[in-house]
């Protein structure tokens, strides 16, 4: 338990900040948004499979899983940001910048390992820049990441010269094997998502860092008074989001086999939607890795179902936005019940 120095305000434990209480497993399970979203995915999938048999085909389910993984990895990166009470609407632009830079590096005939290392460093560095302005200069997360959204997209245009990159030098074979390859019939990106989610889960539930992230989102002032390094933790969550954007860009470039400036454009909404629908509270203080994954899967199932039903793609934003509003409404109802 962390205590304040002598003469300071009364100390609180991190558990008190988080307001943890003894609840049975059943109450936690049935009271979790993640559980009901999982049920929704299964129910929607079964209903759509009856209406449109193509939905249940192996090839279509593989596409649904593959497409959800890219948003899922981004949502895993977004989760600790939202838990800490922040937001990152630049994540799609960071993905685009990392993807374009990755393609340019490989096009210049750099080894695949070097290109990956530099791309991961770039993603973490952009995230650190966001975190610095938010944590140390205390600027609003929305404003900072809105600015980075524009900067990142413009930087991608500058780096690429507005050209499409579709040759990757000596790394081409390895890149395509990484992004488009499969192990036991399952795409590599699926394993990347699972690994990312497991790592985040362990960080959030088994480390002091995760406890601090929850505490900051629950009550930042109280967390600061207990001695938690709020600025450092905030910086780290945005670095993590940038790193996950870089990871996503590597697999996405390998899967697409080319790089365009439109990479990641518009993904911000789907990522935030996936995270919130998966149970993360926009007010901060709660979120899970599994919630990010299942939220991304629900978004993709809905998107795929609409396409198979012949619904105009322009309507997809309406459904995604409605899901966000519904998720926030459910959170508000749950909070009122607990109060």
Image: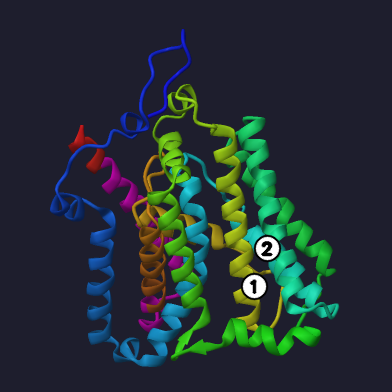
Circle on res. 199: none
Res. 196 in view: yes
Mark 2 vs mark 1: in front: 2
* Furthest residue in direction top, as rendered: 7
Res. 167 in view: no
Check disc 2 and report the residue beneath it: 120
Q: Which residues are magenta?
A: 305-332
53 and 34: which one is in front?
34
What whole-number distance in Å separates the C-alpha atoms at marks 2 and 1? 9 Å
Q: Is residue 239 placed above or below 195 in the rendered structure?
A: above
Residue 182 located within the stretch drawn in magenta: no
Identify which residue is drawn at 34% across, 47% down. Answer: 328
Side of 232 where 84 appears, left or right = left
Identify which residue is drawn at 45% across, 28% down. Answer: 223
Q: Is residue 296 placed above or below 252 in the rendered structure?
A: above
Q: Quadrant of residue 253?
A: bottom right
Q: What secondary structure is found at the residue carrying circle 1?
A: helix
Q: Position of residue 218 (x, y in %)?
A: 39, 34
Q: Is residue 88 placed above or below 67 in the rendered structure?
A: above
Identify which residue is drawn at 26% across, 48% down. Answer: 330
315 and 32: which one is in front?
32
Q: Are marks 2 and 1 in contact (CB under 8 Å)?
A: yes
Circle on res. 250: 1
> Which colour style is shown?
rainbow
Q: Quadrant of residue 157?
A: bottom right
51 and 30: which one is in front?
30
Side of 272 where 44 appears, left or right = left
Predominant SS along the magenta part: helix
Which quadrant, please, contains the C terminus? top left
Q: Quadrant of residue 53?
A: bottom left
Q: What secondary structure is found at the residue carrying circle 2?
A: helix
Residue 315 located within the stretch drawn in magenta: yes
């Amino acid at each position: 338990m962390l205590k304040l120095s002598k003469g300071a305000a009364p100390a609180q434990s991190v558990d008190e900040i988080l307001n943890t209480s003894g609840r049975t497993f059943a109450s936690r399970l049935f009271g979790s948004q993640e559980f009901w979203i999982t049920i929704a995915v299964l129910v929607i999938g079964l209903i759509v499979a009856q209406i449109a048999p193509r939905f249940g085909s192996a090839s279509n389910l593989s596409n649904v899983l593959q497409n959800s993984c890219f948003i899922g990895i981004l949502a895993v990166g977004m989760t600790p940001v939202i838990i800490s009470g922040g937001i990152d609407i630049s994540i799609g632009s960071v993905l685009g910048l990392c993807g374009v830079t990755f393609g340019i590096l490989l096009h210049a005939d750099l080894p695949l390992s070097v290109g990956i290392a530099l791309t991961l460093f770039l993603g973490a560095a952009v995230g650190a820049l966001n975190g610095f302005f938010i944590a140390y200069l205390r600027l609003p997360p929305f404003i900072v990441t809105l600015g980075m959204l524009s900067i990142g997209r413009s930087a991608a245009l500058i780096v690429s010269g507005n050209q499409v990159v579709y040759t990757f030098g000596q790394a081409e074979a390895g890149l395509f094997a990484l992004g488009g390859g499969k192990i036991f019939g399952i795409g590599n990106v699926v394993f990347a998502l699972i690994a990312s989610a497991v790592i985040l889960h362990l960080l959030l539930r088994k480390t002091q860092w995760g406890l601090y992230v929850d505490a900051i989102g629950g009550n930042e002032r109280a967390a600061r008074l207990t001695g938690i390094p709020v600025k450092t933790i905030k910086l780290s969550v945005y670095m993590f989001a940038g790193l996950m954007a870089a990871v996503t860009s590597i697999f996405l470039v390998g899967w697409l086999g080319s790089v365009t400036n439109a990479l990641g454009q518009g993904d911000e909404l789907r990522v935030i939607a996936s995270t919130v629908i998966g149970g993360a509270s926009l007010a901060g203080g709660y979120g899970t890795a599994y919630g990010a994954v299942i939220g991304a899967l629900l978004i993709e199932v809905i998107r795929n179902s609409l396409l198979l039903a012949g619904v105009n793609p322009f309507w997809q934003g309406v459904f995604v936005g409605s899901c966000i509003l519904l998720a926030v409404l459910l959170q508000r109802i749950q909070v009122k019940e607990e109060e």
